[in-house]
Amino acid sequence: MSESVHRTALVTGSTSGIGLGIAGALASVGADVVVTGLGDSHQVGAAVAEVDAAGPGAAEFIGADVRRPEEIERLVASALSRFGTIDILVNNAGVQHVAPIHEFPVARWDDIIAINLSAAFHTIRTAVPGMVQQGWGRIINIASAHSLVASPFKSAYVSAKHGLAGLTKTVALEVAHQGITVNAIAPGYVETPLVTAQVADTAVARGITEAEVVSDVMLAAQPTKRFVTIEQVADLALFLCSEQAASITGAVLSIDGGWTAQ
Ligand code: NAD
């Protein structure tokens, strides 16, 4: 992203993990960042402080439960009233639930579709008019390897992430001539606090070492046998915000250690 042009970014799910990393990376190159997501006051305060400390950009928290369209409308309106524009929109909030299809809780299905897919529809439909007006915008949807391939027991997540890839391509075509790019980043396993915590628990549950959990359970699908890092995903997001990336649109960019090459 060019440091000479001042930008404002809204990153959903930026109180934790990948979203927090992307928010910090954007702040480090001078963007003002709307931090949003769930969390208690301690977690929210720590996230805002981390983004604020990352560089010259300012960080401000605006809360919203992205399961609710009206809260997303309020989030976008508040961000616009505070900063005047949303130049960069990163749809990152996401949740997971693992269960066979006949046991999949209906409420979990509804939440996953709402958070991982419909929320992006609502943020995009409310933020795009401002981007069109200014003739510039960057929309980045944090998809997944599960936007391209499936795994058993993840019906809602895989459906939502495949849908997010379709939404990305569709909106990219609609705004391609208006200076706005729309792309999806499709990571493999990323070492977020959530994933790290699962390593120890899984080692105990399966009676294997933490190293075996990483290599034989979590990274069995990932040829590099390494986690993707938050920093690698954030760097790709930064590149997509640059002028050099102006011709990349409608893409679903894998960053998955070779997972989907197989
Ligand atoms: P995380 O749990 O660390 O962060 C998820 C974020 O989403 C948090 O800020 C949380 O508050 C927010 N969120 C959840 N429900 C919400 C709701 N109802 N309203 C508002 N915010 C809500 O997870 P992460 O690993 O950083 O995942 C971030 C994104 O990356 C997700 O879309 C996930 O599907 C995707 N992803 C993660 C991995 C991985 O291995 N960690 C791999 C591929 C894709």
Image (spheres, rainbow, N blue to C red):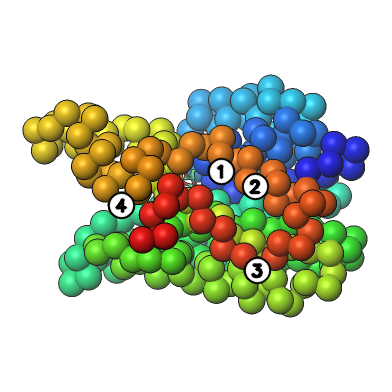
Residue 171: percent from left, percent from top: 67, 73
Q: How far apart are marks 2 and 3 (CA)?
A: 14 Å
**Residue at the disc numbered 3:** 250
Residue labelled with disc 4: 221
Task: Point out the residue furthest to the left here.
Answer: 207
Distance CA(mark 1)–CA(mark 3): 18 Å
> Secondary structure beneath disc 4?
loop
At label 3, which amino acid type do we have? Gly
Callout 2: SS: helix
Nearer to me, 146 or 84: 146
Residue 219, horizontal then vertical, whole percent: 30, 44
Q: Position of residue 149 (x, y in %)?
A: 38, 66
State left or right for residue 114 relative to residue 22: left
Please, what is the three-letter code of the amino acid marked with disc 4?
Answer: Ala
Label 4 – label 3 distance at C-alpha: 26 Å
Q: Name the residue under label 1.
A: 233
